[in-house]
Every structure is written in structure tokens, then in C-alpha cells.
Amino acid sequence: MGLSKGEKNNAEPARPSQTASSETASPAAEDEEDKKGAFSFSGYIDSYFSGNFNKPLSQSNLGLKANGTARVFDQRAGQIALGLAQTVVKYTNRKSEVVVDLAFGPNADLANYANIGTALAIKQAYFSYNITDKWSATIGQFGTHIGYEVIDAPVNFNYSLSNLFGMGPFYHTGLKSTYAFSDRASLMLGVVNAVDGFGDNNRKKGVIAQLYFSPAENWDVYLNGINTNDEDPDDAGNVPEAHYRMLDLATSYQLSEKFLLGLNAAIGSQQYAGTTASKSWGGIAGYANLALTEHFGLGARYEYFDNSNGARALLDASENGTSVNSFTLTGNITLADGHVLLKPEFRIDSYAPRQVGARQFEDSKGELTKNSQSTLGVAFIYKF
């Protein structure tokens, strides 16, 4: 992809296919097989239960009486909830690939919040063409290359998503091109209409970039960037001076067959219309995943996210910027030959202390009296 939040963006970038076989086919037969290509159909459905130890009256994990942004998708507390149902149809041959990735359900509406009508169901819809064995181009709507985690629940080890994920882009519509210098290095550059949108509201295109390299075997590093201006023009068509910029590092190292370490760090700045100065935000998240048996593993994530300047939507009860420390511990139980995933999970979010006025989270009486929340739940995922 460059990589994409709609797919696995801590995997290696897509490269020209390589075929190995113990049998030798004639060149004509191989060429005919390449022309025919191959269809694939896959997807998943997920549901979850999340118990909140604060017992919020609103039955929400969002904070601020269900008006906050403390969680991305696992927003409901004390109830069984549907997450997302996904279907992916893909056709691939030697020179090209087309992907139609459709998503339905509450999380699909949240992820595609800037779309309307039937476009709400489109998580990704794009095609790629291999110009050469090393150079490819992709056009359409595709998941963002920014970040370590992805929308797809079976791909992430942790079920709940990080604030780095939630406060970053989700998808783009545009054109991007990737050049693979080798199996261990590639560069992606692209032009997109906007952040999280399929239309161009101001005739100002955004620029995206990703540099991938592998310093050592089993070590993948992605340096990602985006620079765009999504502000609406005035009545005369003039676009105000503004920007949305983000630099992101996503890296993972497979220390052994059973143990993986990951890191995601990002800094961003945003200047809104009518202002002369930009506001910044940033964060860092560390990951450690351990496969204890063939069917059970544990994964821990620690994250610090700083939005003290109020650039993004992570705000306190006074609508000022805030910061949060989060720790997540997730189990991963695999059943039914890998088709069923059970993810028991504990998470605690601790926000910057407020000594005066309303706090971040509500209690059972609906009063904002707490600066932290702890949840314990389980996700149920079926993939095919």
C-alpha cells in the first residue's frame, strides 16, 4: 500500500508477487494463468462486552457523560454490542489488483464518519497497477498509511484502539505510487483530497509519504507523513491559511517466534482558519506480544497521548486540551482452526488530574467525579 489502516499497516508493503513451484510449467501456461488472475473473498464480524468499574449512568466508556472521546470503537459499557461486519472482495493478476472492502455496523459508521449515503459502507475501494516489477500505482479510497494499529479487529492484538489511532487519520481518497528499491526498502508518495473524506472541499490537495526499510531480519520500520489543508473556503472562494501535518513512526521487531515488540510515536500540528498560530499534539505507544501456546497469547500496550494544546478532540470537561496515560492487557484465544478469536481485555485510562470542577468520567449517579476509568471485557471475533 504504502500501508493502510484498512489493512495491516505494520506488515511489509505490497510487493510484486513471487512464484515458487516444484513443478515446471510452460511459459505459455504461466502467461495464461497470470492473465486469468484469482478472486478471493474474506471478512469478519466482531461483538464485545465491556464492563466499566465506574458504572457510568450513561453506560458509555467515552467519558464526559458520553460526549467524550476516551475510546474509539468500544464505546458501550455494561452491554453486549456489535462492532463491525466486513467483507473484502479482491481480484489479482500479474499486473494489477482491485479491492472492494465493505464494512457495516456501528464501527463502520464511526470509521467512515465523513461519508454519506452508500459511501458509508466503503472502507476501501481501489485498484493498483504494477507499472514495473518495482513500481506500482494505486487510485481510489484507501486506508491511511499513518499509525501502527488498523481498523480490522482480527489484525490488532489489542481489541480496544489507542488514542494515537483515534486521533489520527482513518482513510484518504487519491492517488499514490510506491517504488520498491529492494525487498527491504520502499518509498510511497501520494496526493489525496483530504483527511478522512472522499471529496475535495477547497481545491487544495494533500500530500502523503511513507518510507519503509528493514534494518535487520524481522525488523520493520515505517516513517509516515501527511500535509494538507482541509479548511472550507469563504464565500469568495478564498482558502484560509491553515494546515494539518503529522509525522509518524511505526516499527515492530519479531525477537523470536513467540515474542514481538512494537512502537508507535507521532507528532502533529494543526492551524485552523482564522488563527495565526498552530496547535500541536503527540503521543507514544509501546507493544509487547507473547505467544504462550499455539492457541493462547498475551499482549500489553502502554500509551501516553498529549493533547494539552487542544488541537484534537481529546478534551476535558471545560473543553480544554488534556493528556492521558493508558495501559491495556489483552489475551488472545484462538479456536475453530483460527476462525474464532476471543479477546479478554483489561484497560485503564488515567487523565491529567483536575482538582477543581468536573472531572473526566462519571459515576453511577451521572456526576463527573473521576479522572480515570477501568474496564474489563471480552471481544468475540469470527474471521473467514
Image: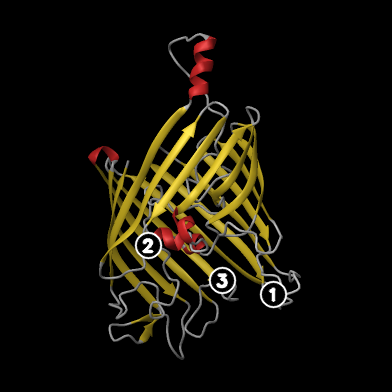
Q: Is residue 258 left or right of residue 181?
A: left
Badge 3 density bin: few <14, some 14–19, many ≥20, Cα 10 Å: many
The N terminus appears in which quarter of the rendering? top right
Number of marks in the image?
Answer: 3
> Residue 195: image x %, image y %?
59, 60
Residue type beneath disc 3: Arg
Residue indicated by mark 3:
312
Judging by the rendered image, the residue that carries numbered circle 1 is 273
Q: For the residue marked with disc 1, what is the amino acid? A: Ala
| Type of amino acid under label 2 | Pro
Q: Residue at x 38, y 50 (%)?
A: 157
- Looking at marks 1 and 2 on the same chain, the residue that comes earlier in the sequence is marked by 2
Q: SS of the residue at dot 2?
A: helix
Q: Which mark is residue 106?
A: 2
State the quadrant of the C terminus: top left
Between 197 and 360, the residue placed more toward the observer is 197
Q: Quadrant of residue 292?
A: top left
